[in-house]
Amino acid sequence: MAESRHPGSAAAPVPRRGLGRLRPMTVRARATLGASAVVAIALAAASLALLGLLDANLLHNAESDAEAQATTVAQLADTNQLDPLLTPTHGADFLQVVDADGRVLTSSQNLLGRAPLATQRPTAPGIVRTTWDTGPFGRGNRQSVVEVTTLTGGGLVTVYAGTSLRDADAADSTTAAALAVGGPMLLLTVAWVTWWVTGRALRPVEAIRAEVAEISDRDLHRRVSVPRTHDEIARLAVTMNSTLDRLESSGQRQRQFIADASHELRSPIAVLRTQLEVALAVDDPALRPELISGALEDTDRLQQLAADLLLLARIDSAEPVPSHELDLTELVEEAIGKRRGDPLPIRAELAPGVAVTGSALWLTRVVTNLLDNAQRFAVQEVTVLLRLARSGRAAVLEVRDDGPGIPEADRERVFERFTRLDDARSRDHGGSGLGLAIARDLATHHGGTLTAEATERGARLVVRLPLAQAPARPHEATAR
């Protein structure tokens, strides 16, 4: 049966091919394999080095014994005191003395009647050390043979002294066998310890993963347990809880935003419906224009509210701010010039040539919203001031009115969405409670701030934006 797939369904894991199938899937397995591989390589290198050093040391000892025996016999040959039968000592297995003509002068018991051990004759006094795979008898262990050539009254005489390497070979074999058994056992021990330790270390991570996997969008209040180890895993749990805090806060803001938007839309829709029903029911044609005019006003309010909600959605989606340098002085002048129909005059004191970076459309919206708010509550006049901050790194825009002002306790609450300090009066003035919230979000999106600050009379809203020459990081205030 063919399996249907939907665009939103989760994609199945892609099967691994080739050597990828042999790779361990879990971190625990990879850590164990990696540690075991490193230890195996180290054990192999150490074993080879140990065997090499052991064999070299034993060979050196055997050569020293053979050289001592050969030197002693050479001294006897030099003084013409050679015995007809030599007795090996110091661990030597055989001795043989040969003159320059290849004649055997004397030897140990086991070499009586044998030809010279070497066919080549030395041409000068000296010492030569060699290792034979077998002894002079064609069997047995390796032999360390030392040739000592000395000059006597009768010419050059060479003494051959051989020492068996049976002890060295036995030690090498025993050591190799011990390493062959102990190495794998040590490797298995390291693998098991790594598997166990890694499992214990990753157990809290698996617990965090399992707990987070069980958290759905309906229980974002749940948190993962933070281990008391004060290590990276504990910090991971703290970071995960911080992320869940932000998700929960975002979800709450979204639900509150939807509830507030629904509440704000309900009233104008209800009023619009009532007006249309009345206009449909009234028979007098003279009243219909007034009813239709009221319906159009409510339609405009709905349209403006929908536009504000759409703008907030764009701001919340963290769209990047267009990076264009613009003249803030000119932008504020143009925004004021378009408001010739305002009920109250606007007095402006603008510093010339104040340049900032951002979106002209969005910054115009900031100025417009602040002027709309000031016009709603001003009594006689609205004042707009634009200057540079004392630090010289920020532009400061102030919009003041001579109205009732904002109580100190509400200077932060006025920037919350759908907030009205006087709900009835704000509705009468046409406010939706979104203007100042949008203005602050836009200012923050440009790396600036918008605050309500103290003044002797009325309200004083202050915008601070970074200058184009000294851009600030997003969501940071550059002037205080």
Image: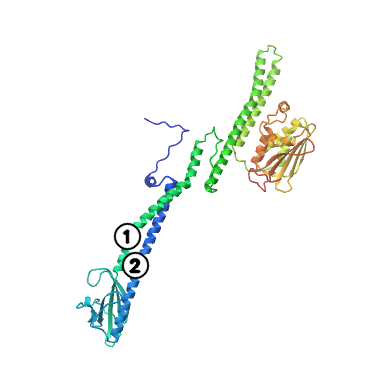
- Classify residue 76 by image quadrant: bottom left
Q: Marks 1 and 2: CB-CB under 8 Å?
A: no
Helix, strand or loop at mark 2 = helix
User: In the displayed structure, does residue 94 sit left or right of residue 28?
Assistant: left
User: In the displayed structure, does residue 346 sit left or right of residue 57?
Assistant: right
Query: From mark 1 to mark 2, how far is it between C-alphas?
Result: 15 Å
Q: Amino acid at mark 1?
A: Ala
Along the line of sight, which residue is nearer the eye, 113 or 287? 113
Dot 2 crowding, Cα within 10 Å, few <14, some 14–19, many 20+: some
Check disc 2 and report the residue beneath it.
55
- Is residue 340 in view from this perspective? no
Residue at coordinates 50% horizontally, 36% vertically from top-left?
214
Which numbered circle lies on residue 177? 1
Q: Is residue 95 above or below residue 260?
A: below
User: In the displayed structure, does residue 214 sit left or right of residue 313?
Assistant: left
* Residue 466 percent coordinates (x, y): 68, 45
Along the line of sight, which residue is nearer the eye, 215 or 353? 215
Residue at coordinates 43% horizontally, 37% vertically from top-left?
12
- Is residue 211 in view from this perspective? yes
Residue at coordinates 60% horizontally, 40% vertically from top-left?
320
Q: How many marks?
A: 2
For the residues carrying marks 1 and 2, which lies nearer the camera in this image? Answer: 1
- Classify residue 425 by image quadrant: top right
